[in-house]
Image (cartoon, helix red, strand yellow):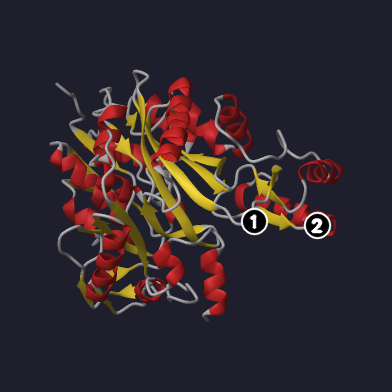
Amino acid sequence: MKKYFNKVLIANRGEIAVRIQRACKELGIQTVAVHSTADSDAMHVKLADESVCIGPPQAVNSYLNIPAIISACEITGAEAVHPGYGFLSENAHFAEILEAHNITFIGPTSEHIKIMGDKITAKETVSNLGIPVVPGSNGKIEDLNHAKKIAKNIGFPVLIKASSGGGGKGMKIAKSQNELEEAFNMAKIEAKASFGDDTVYIEKYLETPRHIEIQILGDKNGNAIHLGERDCSLQRRNQKVLEEATSPVIDTLKRKEIGEIASSAISKLGYHGAGTIEFLYEDNKFYFIEMNTRLQVEHPITEIITDCDLVKEQISIAAGNNLSKKQADVIIKGHAIECRINAENPRTFVPSPGKITAYHPAGGPGVRVDSGAYSGYTIPPYYDSMIGKLIVFGNDRTDCLDKLKRTIDEFVIEGVETTLPLFKDLLQNEDIISGNYNIHWLENYLESHP
C-alpha cells in the first residue's frame, strides 16, 4: 500500500496552486496555501484547508521569501512542500533548507537542480549520458578570441547563451564574424544584469527547428519512464504560447528512440521526480537545450494522452513510492492541445491586470480548464499574467483542432484583455492547421499581422 503525506504546503499561487490542491485532496492530503496580501481572495486561498499570509505583494517579499515559507510549514505542521513551477521550484538553496528542516521537497534533489540549472554543466552531464547536444563550446567562453575560435569551428550563425539563463535573457545571435563581438558583449552584460553571472557559452544556431520536449518520471528506486513528447514550437520571445502532444512531426519510432534515450539517462543520473528534457529538432535530429527539473505549465496535455496524473506521481515519488506505471504501461492515445490564456493585449502582449467582470470557461467532452480565476476576481499587477489554460483532447489532431475552435468561441472573459482572440486567428491559419511551423513562426506571423 502506498504511503503519502498528511499535509502539504503549496509554495505557489494561481492555477498551478489550485491544480496541486486538487491532486492532494483526491489523495486525502490536507493542503496549506501561502499567499501575499494581494492574493487574500485568490482561489487557491479559498480552496485550501489552511492558509498563511507570508508577505506584501512583491514576490521577493512573499512567494520568494524562504524564511516565511519555512515558518508557515512549522506553524501548520506541513511535512512537504510542492513548489509548482516558477518562483522557488528550481531553487537548489530552497530544497536544501527544506531538507535541513526535515521537510520533504516534492521534486528532485538539490544536487540535480544545481546540475541542470547551470546550462554548461547540464550540457556536459547529459552528453556523457548519451543525449545528443547542439554543437558548440565544451564549457564557458573565456574571452572574445575564444568565442571567435569556437564560432569559426562550428560555423555561423551562432547563438551566445547565458550559463545561468532562462526565458530568453542573455541570449544573442551572431550571423557573421562582424556581429560576434557585439553579440558576445551584450549577452554577457544582459546575463550579469539578469542572473548576477556573466558566464556564457556558444552553440550552433539552428535556422528552422521545432521545440520538442520529453516528459520523464523517475522514482527513488531507480525506475524511470518517459511519457512521450510535447511540441512547444509556437513561441514569442522564447515564451511558449500554445503546446500540443503529440508533435505533428514525430512518428512512433522517433518517439520511442528519443524517449528511451531520455529515460535511460535520468535513470543513470539517479534523478527522481518529474522532469522535462527539452530539445531543438531539425532535419530529423534532436539537440538537447536544457532540462527543467520541475512540473511544466503544459503538463496537462501529457496527462490527457497518457492517462497519468503527473502531480499525483510527483507526490507519490517524494513519499518514497515506486512509479505507478512501467514503460510498457504507457499508452499514448489521441491528441491534446493547450492554449495559455493570459491577461494581455493579444497583439502587443502588454499585461492587462484588473477586475474580471464576467467569466464563463468553455466545457464539454474532452475539455479541461485549469484556472484560478472567477467572476469578480481582480488580477493583481505583480505576477505572471496567466489567467488559465484551455486544454482540449481529440481522437486525432483534426478532431482536437475542431474542438479547440469551438471552445475558444465559447470561452468568455470580460473586464480585461486576453489572448483568446490571438488563438482564434491562429486556428484559421493553414500552417497551424497542417502543423507546418517552427520556433520562429509565431514571431514572423505577428510581425506580418500587426
State the residue lying farthest toward the top: 221
Q: Which residue type does callout 1 highlight?
A: Glu
Packing grade of label 2 (10 A; few <14, some 14-19, many >=20) is some
Taking the image as drawn, is residue 293 in sight? no
Report the front residue among 109 and 390.
390
Taking the image as drawn, is residue 4 in sight? yes
| Mark 2 residue element | loop
Q: Residue at x 52, y 80 (%)?
A: 449
- Mark 1 and mark 2 lie on one chain; the one further toward the N terminus is 2
Q: Residue at x 17, y 53 (%)?
A: 47
Residue 315 placement, left or right of 343:
left
Q: Residue at x 76, y 52 (%)?
A: 156
When the figure is inspected, residue 305 is found, relative to residue 325, above or below; the finding is below
When the figure is inspected, residue 391 is found, relative to residue 227, above or below; the finding is below
- What residue sits right under mark 1 in the picture? 207
User: x, y percentage for residue 12?
Assistant: 34, 49
User: x, y percentage for residue 440?
Assistant: 56, 62
Q: Which residue type does callout 2 highlight?
A: Ser
- What residue sits right under mark 2 in the picture? 176
Q: How far, Cα to Cα, is label 1 from label 2?
A: 14 Å
